[in-house]
Image: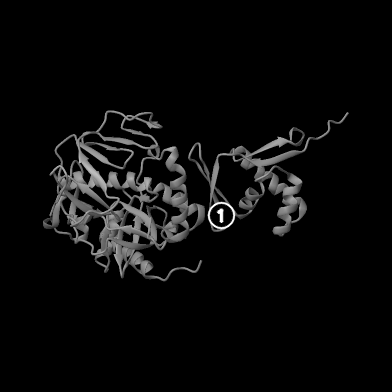
């Protein structure tokens, strides 16, 4: 029997400050003092993550702003989200828990 | 010229690095100003506590909290800044007065400047035609040497080893005139043909001497460019390369004249915002060149030409 897939929702973690640097965004981890740099795409994604959103919704919004096909967009956004999660800037939680 | 206080103790008011301070003793090389200035930093001798209450950071030579900072320079001095930005200093040894005051003032302006939202850069600066450029880098990057080579090419020394980047009421990034001196390695001074007669002091235990420069007539000056200096053995890296955005911001981070532990939680965000602002407002370049001193003149001329080049369209 197949286990139903639980949709993940991505959202920014609290405790970070940002500063605009032209197209890029600098992010400060207020607890550790570490700095992160986000390029234009990652900065756009960061802005969208101010509320919990599933991958599909994020991709739909980003596709409208960047010329990229759906499959490639999905792969790249997922990879970016994984990197942001690994760095602690973003967390993923199950939609059921919402 | 002194100023009498309520307790009839003479004190001296000076301007340096874009701020004013009140000293209990004359500071060699600086000319006092004649009247009290608002927001002056008070420097006092003695009264340095053994420790501070509830430090956020503590190591063998420093302690810092949101409101206080205590530093020990082993064998030289103990230094403390309280919550009201009053500075207390205790000397631990006899020192050349130029070395002593250079140390006290660079610590004072770095710590208090950071608390006021300014950016203390480990940098020397030169000026010409009413604007300045900063030559930033870690110890040994050639800041003073590069500044010295530019003096022969029509620039004036404006600050050595510390530039405190702040903003004018109109929002322009500015730095203040530093102490009117330049500290050069003896080997470099010899290559540049600087006479030993110009020396006013020497730095203990290293072959570095202090040379007197003329006082700047400008208390502060717009800062238009920052050159981050580095030596490289790879000729393909040599040159002057623009850096922007996050790369510029992290480059400036590495050029801060501040121990990381002293940037306590309360100061983190202020420094982050200030660094971002400097990265946006000022043109920043990486200046990479070989360490070969026989090429000093060539690279000084390259840099001088670059300083004169117009601002790049953003």
Disc 1 is placed on an element classified as: strand
* Residue beneath the point at 17% across and 48% down: B98
* Residue beneath the point at 34% across and 46% down: B257
Q: Quadrant of residue B303?
A: bottom left
On the picture, is A72 further left or further right than B192?
right
For the N terminus of chain B, the image quarter is bottom left
On the picture, is A88 further left or further right than B258?
right
Residue B112 image offset from top left, x and y in percent:
33, 45
Res B255 seen here: yes
Farthest-out residue, front: B6
Farthest-out residue, right: A1
Say which of B285 and B169 sits in front: B169
* Residue beneath the point at 49% across and 69% down: B313
Say which of B220 and B96 sits in front: B220
Farthest-out residue, left: B197
Say which of A20 and A5 sits in front: A20
Residue B268 higher or lower than B182, as above or below: above
* Disc 1: which residue: A24
* Residue beneath the point at 66% across and 43% down: A81
Residue B259 image offset from top left, x and y in percent:
36, 40
Q: Residues within 10 Å of mark 1 (few under 14, many from 20)?
A: some
Residue B188 image offset from top left, x and y in percent:
23, 55
Provide the chain ID for the residue under circle 1. A
Res B139 seen here: no
Residue A86 image offset from top left, x and y in percent:
61, 38
């Amino acid at each position: 029997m197949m286990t139903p897939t639980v949709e993940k929702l991505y959202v920014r973690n609290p405790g970070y400050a940002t500063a605009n640097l032209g197209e890029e965004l600098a992010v400060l981890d207020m607890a550790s003092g570490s700095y992160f740099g986000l390029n234009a795409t990652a900065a756009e994604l960061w802005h969208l993550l101010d509320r919990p959103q599933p991958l599909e919704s994020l991709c739909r919004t980003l596709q409208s702003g960047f010329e990229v096909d759906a499959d490639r967009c999905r792969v790249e956004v997922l990879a970016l989200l994984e990197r942001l999660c690994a760095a602690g800037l973003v967390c993923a939680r199950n939609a059921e828990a919402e | 010229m002194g100023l009498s206080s309520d307790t009839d103790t003479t004190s001296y008011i000076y301007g340096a690095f874009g701020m004013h301070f009140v000293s209990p003793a004359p500071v060699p090389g600086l000319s006092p100003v004649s009247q009290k200035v608002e927001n002056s930093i008070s420097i006092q001798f003695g009264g340095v506590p053994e420790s501070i209450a509830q430090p956020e950071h503590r190591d063998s030579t420093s302690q810092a909290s949101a409101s206080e900072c205590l530093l020990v320079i082993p064998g030289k001095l103990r230094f403390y800044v309280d919550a009201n930005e009053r500075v207390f200093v205790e000397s631990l040894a006899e020192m050349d007065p130029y070395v002593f005051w250079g140390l006290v003032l660079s610590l004072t302006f770095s710590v208090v400047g950071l608390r006021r939202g300014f950016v203390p850069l480990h940098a020397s600066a030169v000026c010409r035609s009413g604007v300045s450029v900063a030559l930033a880098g870690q110890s040994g990057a050639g800041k003073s040497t590069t500044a010295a080579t530019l003096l022969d090419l029509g620039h004036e020394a404006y600050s050595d080893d510390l530039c405190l980047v702040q903003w004018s009421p109109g929002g322009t990034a500015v730095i203040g005139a530093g102490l009117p001196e330049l500290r050069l390695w003896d080997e470099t001074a010899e290559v540049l043909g600087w006479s030993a007669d110009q020396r006013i002091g020497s730095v203990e235990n290293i072959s570095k001497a202090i040379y007197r420069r003329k006082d700047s007539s400008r208390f502060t000056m717009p800062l238009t460019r920052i050159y981050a200096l580095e030596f490289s053995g790879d000729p393909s890296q040599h040159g002057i390369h623009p850096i922007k955005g996050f790369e510029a911001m992290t480059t400036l981070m590495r050029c801060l004249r501040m121990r990381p532990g002293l940037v306590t939680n309360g100061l983190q965000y202020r420094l982050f915002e200030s660094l971002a602002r400097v990265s946006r407002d000022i043109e920043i370049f990486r200046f990479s060149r070989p360490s070969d001193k026989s090429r000093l003149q060539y690279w000084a001329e390259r840099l001088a030409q670059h300083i004169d080049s117009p601002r790049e369209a953003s």
